[in-house]
């Protein structure tokens, strides 16, 4: 007997990988864990006959000679495989895309840090010139889209896009993807979201706006990740954490979402024994005090220093400034000479305005002798050196400005421009 299996709470990448493996290992039996994510459950309820699978109960460890594990490399994420864990001489193959190494010792493995495990299978199927049915191609594409956030997660690689191209060539149905990848959001999830919004609080941690909400949930509530997603959107914070406690089971599930590039949810969750991507992750904790969990997360964020780039790392300094009395014609010359698009205007140490090339549009030629204070923008939006790049970008977008003076204790210490934030987003930071 040969078995293909994947992690608990299987998502589309896990499910797609299991059935792609069934094509590559035609003699092996797909076994799905008991817990499935709600989208996957909905998909399977309709496609049950097309994707036959067994449950862990069907396994006879004695008779099993080979185990193919997909989309994980850890024993504890598997369901009902304890009997095989101890078995000696078992031939194990692992297909996975997780960056962390696990404890499953494989005789052979295909593990590469791509966006989805399904990508590795799609590549192999293409190499073997396999033809796929529309349903197979659609399921595999769903796996890749889900795990790469439709190719937007930073973990996405060119290989994922190539695999998607192959699957679309094989007539994957994009309408099907739309209906099954749409997340489950029902009355129970709505209640949880409503409660979270009622108890909304925000705090500043390392320059990020973060919301940590503790809440009790009754019984199994699927789709909590989506609820945290929506919550983060609505309250508009850099990161949101739901600390959901199920009192009857004495367990707490922590779900985190981050939109800030420097705040890595995956590494925070790994510190708590869970896992995830830079933008999203979760951890399951037994017998914990939710207040302590909240403090723990806050400490992890505060300690997450190397990962978060601050304004002070990106800003330029010293800053060239002009005084309020500098004549406009001199400012024009200086802008050209320095190759800048604007200067802060300072009176002593404090910033009293900003003058930029844009402001010259309203200056008539005979006004060029007037002082800069007549034309500068006097409402200065400044930023603290400890703030995050996301915050700087937000301020610039919201106020339609291209530069922010960086001010510490009332003193101008640097300038951050739109170009500086771009450099950060496109990962063009100079080596330090
Ligand atoms: Mn995956």
Image (tube, grey):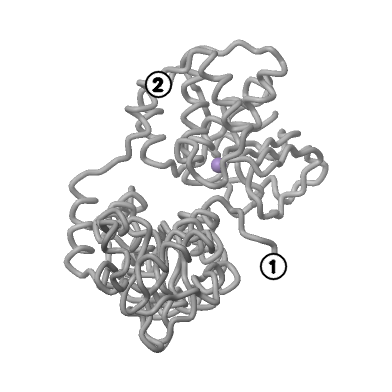
Q: Could you say where residue 368 lies in the image, as x and y percent from the top left?
A: 32, 64
429 in relation to 88, above or below: below
376 in relation to 126, above or below: below
Residue at 46 percent across and 37 percent down: it is 146
Residue 206: numbered disc: none
Specify the farthest residue to the front: 366
Describe residue 386's horizontal placement relative to residue 241 as left or right: right
Q: Could you say where residue 388 lies in the image, as x and y percent from the top left?
A: 45, 68
The residue lying toward the viewer, choosing from 268 and 380, is 380
The residue lying toward the viewer, choosing from 20 and 364, is 364
Quadrant for ligand 1 reads top right
Would you say the beta carbon of the disc 1 residue lies within 8 angstroms of ligand 1? no
Q: Nearer the viewer, mark 2 or mark 1?
A: 1
Residue at 28 percent across and 60 percent down: it is 399
Secondary element under disc 2, as helix, strand or loop, is helix
The residue lying toward the viewer, choosing from 15 and 422, is 422
Residue 174: numbered disc: 2
Q: Is residue 73 visible?
A: yes
- Answer few, some or many: residues within 10 Å of disc 2's Cα (few below 14, many 20 plus, some between 14 and 19): few
């Amino acid at each position: 007997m040969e078995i293909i299996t994947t992690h608990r709470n299987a998502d589309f990448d896990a499910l797609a990988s299991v059935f792609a493996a069934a094509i590559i290992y035609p003699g092996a039996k797909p076994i799905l864990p008991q817990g499935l994510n709600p989208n996957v459950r909905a998909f399977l309820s309709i496609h049950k006959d097309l994707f036959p699978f067994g449950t862990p109960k069907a396994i006879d460890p004695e008779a099993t000679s080979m185990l193919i594990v997909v989309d994980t490399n850890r024993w504890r994420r598997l369901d009902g495989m304890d009997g095989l864990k101890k078995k000696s001489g078992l031939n194990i193959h692992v297909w996975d895309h997780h960056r962390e190494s696990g404890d499953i010792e494989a005789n052979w493995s295909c593990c590469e840090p791509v966006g989805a495990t399904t990508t590795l299978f799609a590549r192999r199927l293409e190499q073997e010139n396999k033809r796929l049915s529309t349903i197979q191609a659609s399921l595999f594409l769903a796996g890749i889209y889900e795990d790469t956030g439709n190719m937007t997660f930073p973990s996405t690689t060119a290989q994922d896009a190539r695999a998607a191209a192959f699957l679309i060539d094989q007539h994957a149905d994009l309408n099907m993807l739309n209906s099954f990848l749409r997340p489950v959001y029902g009355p129970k999830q709505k209640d949880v979201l409503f409660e979270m919004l009622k108890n909304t609080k925000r705090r500043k941690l390392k320059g990020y706006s973060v919301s940590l909400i503790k809440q009790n949930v009754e019984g199994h509530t699927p789709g909590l990740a989506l609820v945290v997603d929506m919550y983060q959107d609505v309250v508009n914070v850099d990161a949101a954490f739901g600390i959901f406690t199920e009192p009857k089971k004495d367990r707490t599930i922590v779900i985190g979402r981050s939109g800030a590039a420097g705040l890595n949810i995956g590494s925070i969750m790994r510190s708590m024994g869970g896992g995830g991507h830079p933008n999203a992750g979760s951890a399951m904790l037994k017998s914990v005090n939710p207040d302590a969990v909240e403090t723990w997360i806050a400490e992890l964020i505060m300690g997450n220093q190397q990962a978060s780039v601050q304004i002070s790392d990106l800003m330029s300094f010293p800053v060239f400034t002009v005084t309020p009395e500098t004549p406009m014609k001199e400012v024009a010359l200086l802008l050209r000479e320095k190759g800048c698009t604007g200067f802060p205007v300072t009176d002593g140490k404090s910033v009293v305005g900003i003058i930029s090339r844009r402001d010259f549009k309203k200056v008539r030629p005979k006004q060029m002798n007037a002082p800069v204070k007549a034309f500068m923008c006097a409402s200065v939006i400044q930023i603290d050196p400890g703030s995050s790049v996301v915050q700087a970008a937000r301020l610039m977008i919201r106020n339609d400005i291209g530069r922010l003076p960086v001010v510490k204790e009332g003193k101008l210490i640097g300038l951050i421009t739109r170009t500086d934030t771009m450099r950060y987003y496109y990962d063009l930071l100079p080596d330090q």
